[in-house]
Structure formats: structure tokens, C-alpha cells
Amino acid sequence: MKIMAVIGSPRRGGNTDFLVDRVARGAASKTAVELDTLFVTEHSIGYCTGCLTCTFPPPGTKACPLPDDMPGILERMVACDAFIFGTPNHMRTVSSPLLTFFSRLLPLMEFVPDTDAEGRITGGGFTSRLSGRRAAIVISQGDPVFSSALVHEVLERNLIDLGIRRVGDVISRGNMGPQDVRAKSDDLEKAFQLGMNLVTMTGMR
Ligand SMILES: Cc1cc2nc3c(=O)[nH]c(=O)nc-3n(C[C@H](O)[C@H](O)[C@H](O)COP(=O)(O)O)c2cc1C
């Protein structure tokens, strides 16, 4: 099974990285896993300029004009069966590199509009080249008490738009130091179980 771990933390070896690794180990305890790890901060990923060349018109037929690493990354994603998306809570949302990364996934999606009798767009939804994949969500934060509701919402809503089904999540709190999560045995166990579930649920496609 091919899993891509997308890590939005700039800290290699930090809390998010460690938790994501636990999820991957849980998956590997159930089946043979080919892991493709992507530290978003270690790639050239430009800001979306909003030109929508990748989307209109006609939807999805034109490539993004930015000259960076994204075309290869998109093909790596399409080749995967499942994902682990990990982020620290930064300013109460996902890390800015991860948000930049998500905004560059538009070429994988196609907006299918609903129109009224006069042809005006009244709503719509997305189709996606990642449709039917499964994903585990990993969040680490410094605050020991308040949950990362917005962080979770941003990840979850984007996964829905991408057609990726969320298997579950680990939200680890109170990790201000880069190694803090290593002492949180409950969170580490939850991450391992999540990896096992990711394999089980991906097999039930
Ligand atoms: C720029 C920045 C903003 C942060 N904002 C928050 C926040 O809003 N809420 C919170 O609980 N922790 C916040 N933190 C703490 C991180 O979420 C926490 O240290 C996390 O465990 C880091 O994960 P990492 O080791 O994988 O990078 C922030 C840290 C940084 C560097």
C-alpha cells in the first residue's frame, strides 16, 4: 500500500513528524507500506497567484504556470492509496506552508457548477483525481487545554473537497517543546491505532 505523509511542520523531528511516523508505523504493522514522506517546507512551492489557469476554462485542462515542484508532487499524490496529513497549530490554524500547499491542489480538482434556468451558477461541488482515497489527520499544538477546532475544520473541509475520506485523527496538546509529544504515551498509541485503521479502511474502498 502506498501512503503519502504530508508534513506541514517546519521542524523535522518535531512533534508532528514524530506523531506522523507513529501513524505510519501502525499502518506498516498491518500491511507492506511504501511511504512517501513530503515535508512541504523542504520543497519549492510557490503561492497561488489566483490566475485560475488550472481551473477555468475549461475546468482542469490547463496546468499551473508556476515553475516549482508542484507538478511532480501532484503526480506522486495521485499514485498513492492513502494519506497522512500532519500539521502544528500555528496561529490557531494549519501552518502557512501547509495552507499554501493546499491552495496548489486545485489542478487535481474540477468544479462542477449547478446552474439555474438562466445558466447562473447557484452552487456546485468538486470532482477530484484523489477521490476515494482515505486520510488520517495529525495535529500537534502548544496549548494544553483548548482544542484545535479551526485547524481540524480547515483540514477536514479541504479533504471533503478533494474527495478524500477521513479515517480519524490525533490531536495532541501541550507540545510547546519540539520533543514534548514523545512523553505522551496515550497520543502515541492513538496514532499507532490510527495507522492500523487507515489500512483497514483503505482496503474497504
Ligand atoms: C508561529 C507559531 C504559532 C503557534 N500558534 C499556536 C496556537 O495558536 N495555538 C497553540 O496551541 N499552539 C501554537 N503554537 C505551538 C505549536 O502548535 C506547537 O509547538 C506544536 O507542537 C509544534 O509542532 P511541531 O513540533 O511539529 O512543529 C504555535 C507555534 C508557532 C511556532
Image (cartoon, rainbow, N blue to C red):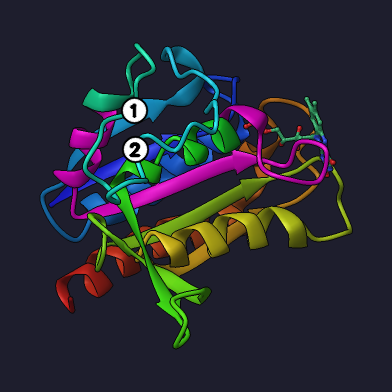
Label 2 to label 1, Cα distance in Å? Answer: 5 Å
Residue 149 as seen in the image, left or right of residue 8: right
Q: Position of residue 197 (x, y in %)?
A: 33, 69
Q: In the figure, 116 relative to 50: above or below?
A: below
Q: Position of residue 136 (x, y in %)?
A: 43, 58
Q: In the figure, 144 relative to 100: above or below?
A: below
Check disc 1 and report the residue beneath it. Answer: 64
The image quadrant in which ligand 1 is located: top right
Q: Give me the residue at 88% from left, 59% from top.
A: 146
Residue 196 in magenta?
no
| Mark 2 residue crowding within 10 angstroms, few (<14) / some (14–19) / many (20+) | many
Residue 182 as seen in the image, left or right of residue 124: right
Check disc 2 and report the residue beneath it. Answer: 54
Q: In the rendered structure, which segment of residues is drawn in magenta?
A: 73-97
- Whether tag 2 and tag 1 are in contact, CB under 8 A, the answer is yes
* Amino acid type, residue under disc 1 in the picture: Cys
Residue 75 in magenta?
yes
Q: Position of residue 31 (x, y in %)?
A: 13, 57
